[in-house]
């Protein structure tokens, strides 16, 4: 067994984000063009007839919704470009150090790098909530009772995967598991 374990965290460059950024942009652009074409009385989208659409109030609302859709899609594309949330979790038994590294939004706090001594870790905590919005998360629990999340954001892991990852990590670090009853 190796003395170093490194888990890569995907971040915002996942298929669902590409999908939603594209769909929201197309929808927002469609709304925006319909609103503008109702103002100009010109057919900007060939497969629609917006001549019956009155600019005030329908055209204004369409333009507003289109603008909001385009801005939201720009935000999503920027988070994809900057790869917000990407990073790694490194568990190094040779140095006795745990490193949690994540990318953030550009600026002063772009990089989040947390380092903990393995001897500061009390347990691996597992949080499982089933229902409408299920959560299956693994946390590092420090001796001063802080809980640092280790799992990816997105689709919840299978229960067996959570148990397997938590037990492997607890064994690797030499700590107990909390929350698996």
Image (cartoon, rainbow, N blue to C red):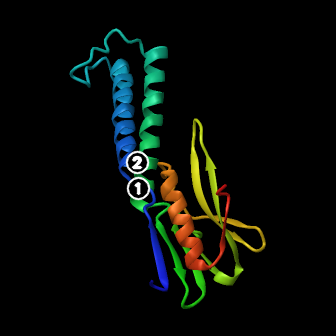
Task: Tell whether 38 sits left or right of 174.
Answer: left
The outermost residue toward the front is 181
Q: Nearer the viewer, residue 57 or 170?
A: 170
The answer to whether the residues at label 1 and label 2 have Cβ atoms under 8 Å apart is yes
Residue in view at x 36 percent, y 18 percent: 38
Marking on residue 80: 1
Task: Tell whether 176 sits left or right of 61.
Answer: right
Give the image location of residue 26, x and y in percent.
Answer: 33, 35
Q: Residues within 10 Å of mark 1 (few under 14, many from 20)?
A: some
The outermost residue toward the bottom is 94
Residue in view at x 59 percent, y 42 percent: 130
From the viewer's perspective, is the residue at label 1 or at label 2 nearer? Answer: 2
Q: Quadrant of residue 131?
A: top right
Element type at mark 1: helix
Marking on residue 17: 2
In the rendered image of this protein, does residue 78 appear above or below residue 53?
Answer: below
Give the image location of residue 45, x and y in percent.
Answer: 25, 24
Residue in view at x 55 percent, y 86 percent: 93
First-in-chain label (1 vs 2): 2
Element type at mark 2: helix
Give the image location of residue 67, x and y in percent.
Answer: 44, 34
Task: Tell whether 13 sits left or right of 133.
Answer: left
- Quadrant holding the N terminus: bottom left
In the rendered image of this protein, does residue 69 appear above or below residue 112?
Answer: above
In the rendered image of this protein, does residue 5 appear above or below residue 31?
Answer: below
The outermost residue toward the right is 144
Task: Tell whether 25 sits left or right of 171.
Answer: left
Give the image location of residue 11, x and y in percent.
Answer: 45, 60
Q: Quadrant of residue 134?
A: top right
């Amino acid at each position: 067994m190796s003395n170093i374990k490194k888990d890569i965290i995907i971040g915002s460059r996942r298929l669902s984000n590409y999908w939603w950024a594209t769909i929201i942009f197309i929808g927002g652009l469609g709304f925006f063009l319909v609103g503008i074409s109702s103002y100009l009385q010109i057919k900007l989208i060939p497969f629609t007839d917006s001549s019956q659409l009155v600019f005030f109030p329908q055209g204004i609302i369409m333009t507003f919704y289109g603008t909001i859709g385009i801005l939201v899609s720009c935000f999503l594309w920027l988070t994809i470009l900057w790869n917000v949330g990407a990073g790694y979790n490194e568990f190094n038994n040779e140095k006795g150090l745990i490193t949690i590294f994540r990318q953030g939004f550009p600026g002063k706090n772009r990089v989040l790098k947390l380092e903990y001594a393995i001897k500061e870790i009390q347990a691996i905590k597992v949080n499982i909530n089933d229902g409408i919005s299920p959560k299956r998360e693994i946390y590092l629990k420090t001796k001063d009772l802080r809980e640092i999340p280790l799992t990816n954001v997105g689709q919840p892991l299978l229960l067996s995967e959570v148990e397997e990852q938590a037990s492997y990590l607890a064994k690797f670090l030499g700590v107990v598991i909390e929350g698996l009853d």
